[in-house]
Amino acid sequence: MADSPSKDGSFPEIHCSGILDEILFRDPPNAIQQAESKNGVTKLVEIVTFADGSKLAIHAQVPLPPMADMTPSEVFSIKLSGEKSQKSDEGIGEANSLARQSMAVRLMARISHLLDGIPEVSKIKCPACKGQKLCILCGGTGCTQCNDTGACKECGGRGYVLND
């Protein structure tokens, strides 16, 4: 049975006793910072794969407020060519900020924070892609070798492999 929170609302620490009590991969590595907003909802997903083969998926979904009520702001970006650009975010920044205040996302952040205390299996940069995460044949555009994903086949697009 799972531990229940104490009277102050905090959960006890997670104790890791063996080599299989480690995190193998977290996808994406910083789920709380990465949000996808479309079709009227903001979604955050984190999948944690442990060294023993078990997986934990954390998913938060928050309805977007009406975009007409959001304040657009200017977003600066740098294209792959090095060219700087500026465009309006159409209010999605404010909508994501509001979504992060929801109970579902705050609880997801607490669970993710608990997982930060679990050690990760040691990894090294992928020798094939040198940590770039891209297929070495097509450079990320997609080809038959990478099944048109653009991701490195050796590391699965993570940039790191297990340190043997």
Image: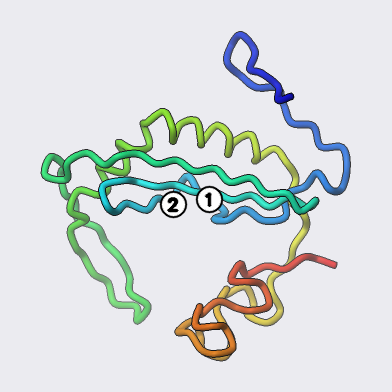
Q: Is residue 101 above or below residue 7?
A: below
Q: Is residue 164 above or below residue 21?
A: below
Relative horizontal placement of residue 123, taking residue 74 as reference (left or right)? right
- The quadrant holding residue 17 is top right
SS of the residue at dot 2? loop
**Callout 1 environment at 10 Å: few (<14), some (14 to 19), or many (20+)?**
few
- The quadrant holding residue 159 is bottom right
Relative horizontal placement of residue 8, taking residue 86 as reference (left or right)? right
User: Residue 34, percent across and down?
Assistant: 44, 52
User: Residue 79, percent across and down?
Assistant: 33, 74
Q: Quadrant of the N terminus?
A: top right
- The residue pinned by badge 2 equals 34
**Callout 2 environment at 10 Å: few (<14), some (14 to 19), or many (20+)?**
few
- The kind of residue on which mark 2 rests is Gln
Farthest residue in the left direction?
68
Relative horizontal placement of residue 23, taking residue 63 as reference (left or right)? right
- The kind of residue on which mark 1 rests is Asn
Q: Quadrant of the C terminus?
A: bottom right
User: Residue 121, percent across and down?
Assistant: 77, 54
Q: Which numbered tag is attached to residue 83?
A: none
SS of the residue at dot 1? loop
- The quadrant holding residue 134 is bottom right
Give the residue displayed 30% in from the left and 39% down from the top.
63
Q: CA distance from mark 1 to mark 2?
A: 7 Å
Instruction: Check contact, mark 1 vs mark 2: CB within 8 A.
Output: yes
- The residue pinned by badge 1 equals 30
Farthest residue in the top direction?
7
Farthest residue in the right direction?
18
Give the residue displayed 50% in from the left and 30% down from the top.
107
Give the residue displayed 17% in from the left and 53% down from the top.
90
- How has the structure been colored for display? rainbow
Give the residue displayed 57% in from the left and 83% down from the top.
146
